[in-house]
Image (tube, coloured by chain):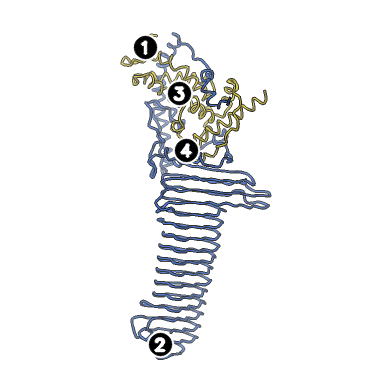
């Protein structure tokens, strides 16, 4: 405990320990959904909190720190995704299609294990955009800024991800 | 009871989707973190030194390689290894950065608002298929791909396959420059006064049967870069063995006072009611109709029929083998062609032309005319202006010609036959022929001679030579 407090600034009411308790679970799960690997996610969040050690004094509220931490975790996770894919992960802004408006005619019955497994099976880029939009409630504008793509690209990627996800879920339901 | 959407289902069960629980904070964990903080500090110093070396190296290489390109990407030194690893995603080690998407573009104060209002997402064909995966595990981007391609906003609609259709109706705002590239589309373009919008409407269908070399597809790509809109409308996969029938119509409403550049391969083109800074057309073949256009106009057409009516502004035409008809043109005309039938009527402006063979009809022209027409016959009626014409075997014929100061009419094997409105008795003539006859009919006398005829009587002077042809003036 003492170590944790020692790691925070004397001028800040925030402690790294409190912040960890508050945000660790959310951040690890956020990262795990993006990188699709719990162990890597834990490392990323650990690194993010270490970065937080040097910056926590800049924040006066938990929300501010939480928002900052989320950005760091998201960016580190994206970076990890790129490293893992050996630079093959790319959302190409110049050739994106904003053409997918195919609606799913009927929503299938969803079950949590099936949906979780199906999300994990999405391609990296799809899973990334879907996670940010649905789980983290990012707007397409925010996703575009985070990924350095256009808003239109984000929308099209999300539409595709959603369509793909439902296809995977339906195929699993048929098999079972 | 209606079923939940996937988004609602996830949000209602969000906690259940947590994959893992974090390890509880224990003394060891904190100690581990603290140790890691210390070690990371050492690592950080080392990495920063390495990062500076790496960044310096990359910067020098980048500068040398891409020194001629604009590079808007910021490489974060604080990102250390990350900033070098990835050119597009920098780990944010500082307080939140500004939103890159809110940058202003010329003509668009807020591109995000623009896209929300006019995103093709809302209005495109529901049956459009996806292009190859953008997020493609097999795609290996070049290191700087993303930087080069970040600037424009690109919208692409693609239908692949035989017997497919594509329908698009969308709008782009704040446009001052439009570039269009099409291959087998019929293009209809209209100007809309007081607007900065470009309305794009596409109706296309292919009925391809047979063995194709390339994948059949209909593709429309709109690239928006600031206030510049580039539109490509293409049929693909139309070569091979079989029947490659395509039917595409691209209808555009373009803004007033924009610059319009159109590259058009095959198909008909109809442009009307346009007031622009520049209209530049390049077409391979097809029928071209341009009416009610106020703009400097450049027309390059290889094969087909070209009709211009009620045009205002300088008109430059570079024509391959066409029939060209131009009526009611206010502004100078610059024309050149190899094989062409040209008819110019109601022109208020100077005409300068060069034609190898074909017919030239000039009717109701107010302006000077200069033509170099090798094997072409030149026929004029009701012209007010000076003439400067050269042919090889073409005849130069004119009725109701009113000279302002001079005419210079020369032919090798053709004849010159001009009927002037001017008072011939007050004109000077220098007429020469080697093997032909010279006939000059003035108010009193009719002179007929061979060889040279030189008369000095007034300020308006007609000079004409016809090596083996006749010269007839009245």
Q: What residue is disc 3 on?
A: A73
Regarding residue A38, the answer to whether it shows in the image is no
Q: Is mark 4 on a helix, strand or loop?
A: loop
Regarding residue B74, the answer to whether it shows in the image is yes
How far apart are the alpha carbons under marks 1 and 3?
A: 22 Å
Q: What residue is disc 2 on?
A: B442
The C terminus of chain B sits in image quarter: bottom left
Q: Nearer the viewer, residue B454 or B155?
A: B155
Image coords of residue B304 (percent x, y): 55, 62
Residue at the location (40% across, 38% down)?
Answer: B72
Image coords of residue B154 (percent x, y): 49, 42
**Tag nearer the camera, 3 or 4:** 3
Relative to residue B335, is residue A140 depicted above or below? above
Q: Which of B128 and A15 is in front in this view?
A: B128
How far apart are the alpha carbons under marks 2 and 1?
A: 116 Å
Q: What residue is disc 1 on?
A: A5
* Mark 4 Cα shell of 10 Å, populated few (<14), some (14-19), many (≥20): some
The N terminus of chain B sits in image quarter: top right
Q: What residue is disc 4 on?
A: B144
Q: Chain A is drawn in which colour?
A: yellow
* Mark 2 Cα shell of 10 Å, populated few (<14), some (14-19), many (≥20): some
Left or right placement of residue A124 versus residue B474 in this view? right
Q: Do labels 2 and 3 share a chain?
A: no
**Tag nearer the camera, 2 or 3:** 2
């Amino acid at each position: 405990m003492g170590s944790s407090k020692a790691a925070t600034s004397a001028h800040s009411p925030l402690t790294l320990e409190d912040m960890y308790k508050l945000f660790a679970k959310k951040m690890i799960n956020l990262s795990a959904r993006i990188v699709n690997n719990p162990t890597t996610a834990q490392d990323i969040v650990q690194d993010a909190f270490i970065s937080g050690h040097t910056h926590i004094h800049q924040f006066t509220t938990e929300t501010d720190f939480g928002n900052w931490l989320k950005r760091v975790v998201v960016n580190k996770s994206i970076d990890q995704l790129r490293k893992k894919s050996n630079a093959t992960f790319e959302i190409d802004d110049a050739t994106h299609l904003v053409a997918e408006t195919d609606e799913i005619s009927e929503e299938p019955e969803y079950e949590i294990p099936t949906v979780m497994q199906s999300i994990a099976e999405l391609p990296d880029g799809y899973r990334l955009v879907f996670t940010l939009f649905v789980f983290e409630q990012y707007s397409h504008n925010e996703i575009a800024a985070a990924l350095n793509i256009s808003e239109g690209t984000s929308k099209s990627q999300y539409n595709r991800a959603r369509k793909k996800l439902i296809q995977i879920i339906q195929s699993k339901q048929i098999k079972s | 009871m209606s079923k939940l959407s996937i988004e609602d289902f996830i949000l209602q069960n969000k906690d259940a989707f947590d994959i893992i629980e974090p390890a509880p904070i224990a003394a060891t964990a904190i100690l581990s973190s603290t140790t890691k903080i210390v070690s990371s500090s050492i690592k950080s110093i080392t990495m920063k030194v390495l990062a500076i070396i790496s960044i310096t190296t990359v910067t020098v290489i980048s500068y040398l390689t891409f020194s001629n390109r604009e590079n808007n990407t910021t490489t974060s030194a604080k990102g250390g290894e990350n900033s070098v690893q990835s050119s597009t995603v920098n780990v944010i080690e500082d307080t939140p950065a500004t939103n890159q998407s809110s940058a202003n573009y010329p003509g668009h104060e807020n591109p995000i608002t623009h896209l929300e209002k006019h995103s093709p997402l809302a209005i495109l064909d529901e049956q459009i298929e996806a292009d190859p995966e953008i997020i493609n595990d097999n795609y290996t981007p070049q290191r700087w791909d993303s930087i080069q391609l970040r600037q424009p906003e690109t919208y692409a609609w693609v239908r692949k396959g035989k017997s497919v259709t594509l329908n698009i109706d969308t709008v782009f705002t704040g446009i001052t420059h439009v570039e269009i590239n099409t291959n087998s589309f019929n293009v209809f373009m209209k100007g809309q006064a007081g607007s900065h919008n470009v309305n794009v409407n596409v109706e296309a269908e292919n009925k391809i049967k047979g063995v194709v070399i390339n994948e059949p597809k209909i593709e429309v790509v709109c690239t928006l870069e600031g206030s510049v809109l580039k539109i490509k409308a293409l049929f693909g996969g139309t070569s091979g063995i079989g029947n490659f029938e395509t039917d595409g119509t691209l209808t555009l409403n373009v803004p007033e006072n924009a610059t319009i550049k159109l590259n058009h391969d095959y198909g008909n083109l109809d442009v009307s009611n346009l007031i622009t800074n520049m209209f530049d057309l390049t077409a391979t073949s097809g029928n071209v109709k341009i009416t009610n256009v106020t703009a400097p106009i450049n027309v390059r057409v290889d094969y087909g029929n070209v009709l211009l009516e009620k045009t205002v502004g300088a008109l430059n035409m570079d024509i391959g083998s066409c029939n060209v008809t131009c009526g009611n043109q206010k502004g100078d005309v610059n024309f050149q062609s190899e094989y062409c039938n040209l008819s110019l009527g109601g022109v208020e402006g100077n005409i300068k032309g060069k034609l190898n063979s074909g017919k030239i009809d000039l009717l109701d022209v107010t302006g000077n005319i200069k033509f170099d027409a090798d094997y072409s016959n030149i026929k004029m009626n009701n012209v007010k202006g000076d003439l400067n014409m050269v042919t090889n075997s073409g005849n130069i014929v004119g009725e109701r010609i009113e000279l302002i100061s001079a005419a210079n009419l020369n032919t090798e094997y053709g004849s010159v036959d001009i009927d002037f409105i001017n008072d011939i008795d007050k004109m000077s003539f220098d007429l020469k022929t080697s093997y032909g006859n010279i006939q000059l009919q003035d108010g009193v006398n009719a002179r007929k001679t061979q060889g040279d005829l030189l008369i000095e009587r007034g300020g308006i002077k007609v000079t004409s030579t016809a090596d083996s042809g006749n010269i007839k003036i009245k």
